[in-house]
Image (spheres, rainbow, N blue to C red):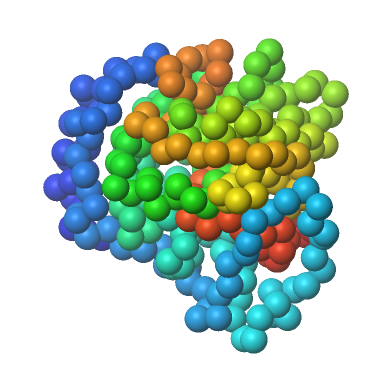
């Protein structure tokens, strides 16, 4: 999915990996900016009639409308939740199909990063990234890019938690001071998924066995606050006010200082960042959510 023009940039980033401090934290400001490297957008595309959703709230009802019925001929944003679609509203997307030390963004945003001690595993779609407690996936802060998410955004991922995500929440996606999406094994056949924005926390509980795929998402809109969504079902919500901050973004851990105590154990796939607040219909019309 990434063009040959990335070859020289790949060498530069792998060199940067050597200089990065291990999972205990470190500075990533020296990671090269690959925005102009010729990265190609994902091969999956949506029709010209794609629609985006409004803010999700805890009072939203479940929609039974199919993707074909929901607009006048185009697919909904939700139908792209399983892949990196070529949509303007998709800010960044990580498919974890390549494991050479670089975290590839399949969108034109070019929000690339670094992978450390992450291995390939069967994913929800194609390959996924296995996190073993010592893994590190980092994206350097870029204020000019993250500002596009300031007023509204959705962060989403497929996760397959292994045994051991206990004692305290484990980070799925974190940009400390902006957003934090975590999971905790309640050890009773349920997982607690939380999203924190600006000190406000939204919580959802989802029934699932260990080593089962769960779709998790956090939806934010300035005038409506934060809502957590699991497998397309709306969970808790609350007022919130987002600030972009200046910390690096972590996948598979909770910042600002990543540690084994907050490290996610299991497989993560299809991490997406949208610069819009997706609706419940957007989630439920995704082909494999079945809600």
The quarter of the picture where residue 39 lies is: bottom left
Residue visible at 82% across and 36% down in the picture: 207
| Quadrant where the image shows the N terminus | bottom left
Tell me how many marks there are: 0
Work out which residue is located at the far right of the displayed protein and give it. Answer: 188
Residue in view at x 64 percent, y 86 percent? 72
Tell me: residue 55, above or below residue 157: below
Q: Position of residue 63 (x, y in %)?
A: 80, 65
Tell which residue pokes out farthest to the bottom in this image. Answer: 72
Is 31 located above or below residue 46 in the figure?
A: above
Q: Nearer the viewer, residue 245 or 158?
A: 245
Residue sitting nearer the eye, 275 or 210: 275
Residue 11 visible at all: yes
Where residue 101 appears, as percent x and y from the top left, is 31, 35
Spot occupied by residue 246 in the image (x, y as percentages of width and height): 35, 31
**What's the residue at 39%, 14% (across, down)?**
24
Looking at the image, residue 53 sits to the left or right of residue 208; the answer is: left
Using the rendered image of the protein, determine whether residue 208 is visible from the camera's viewpoint: no
Q: Quadrant of the C terminus?
A: bottom right
Q: Position of residue 226 (x, y in %)?
A: 64, 43
Q: Residue at x 56, y 49 (%)?
A: 222
Q: Nearer the viewer, residue 221 or 205?
A: 221
Q: Residue furthest front?
A: 223
As drawn, is 91 to the left or to the right of 164?
A: left
């Amino acid at each position: 999915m990434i063009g040959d023009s990335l070859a020289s940039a790949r060498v530069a980033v792998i060199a940067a990996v050597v200089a990065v401090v291990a999972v205990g934290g470190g500075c990533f400001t020296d990671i090269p900016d690959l925005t102009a490297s010729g990265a190609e957008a994902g091969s999956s595309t949506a029709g010209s009639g794609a629609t985006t959703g409004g803010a999700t709230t805890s009072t939203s009802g479940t929609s039974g409308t199919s993707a074909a019925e929901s607009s006048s001929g185009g697919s909904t944003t939700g139908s792209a939740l399983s892949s990196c679609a070529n949509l303007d509203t998709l800010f960044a997307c990580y498919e974890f199909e390549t494991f050479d030390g670089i975290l590839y963004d399949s969108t034109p945003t070019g929000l690339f990063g670094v992978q450390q001690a992450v291995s390939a595993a069967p994913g929800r779609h194609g390959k996924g990234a296995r996190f073993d407690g010592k893994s590190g996936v980092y994206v350097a802060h870029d204020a000019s890019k993250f500002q596009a998410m300031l007023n509204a955004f959705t962060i989403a991922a497929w996760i397959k938690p292994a045994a051991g995500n206990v004692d305290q929440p484990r980070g799925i996606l974190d940009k400390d001071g902006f957003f934090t999406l975590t999971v905790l094994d309640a050890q009773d056949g349920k997982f607690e998924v939380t999203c924190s924005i600006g000190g406000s926390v939204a919580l959802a509980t989802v029934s699932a066995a260990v080593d089962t795929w769960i779709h998790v998402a956090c939806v934010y809109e300035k005038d409506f606050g934060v809502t957590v969504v699991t497998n397309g079902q709306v969970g808790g919500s609350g007022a919130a006010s987002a600030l972009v901050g200046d910390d690096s973004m972590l996948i598979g851990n909770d910042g600002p200082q990543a540690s084994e105590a907050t490290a996610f154990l299991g497989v993560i796939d299809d991490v997406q960042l949208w610069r819009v607040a997706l609706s419940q219909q957007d989630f439920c019309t995704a082909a494999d959510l079945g809600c």
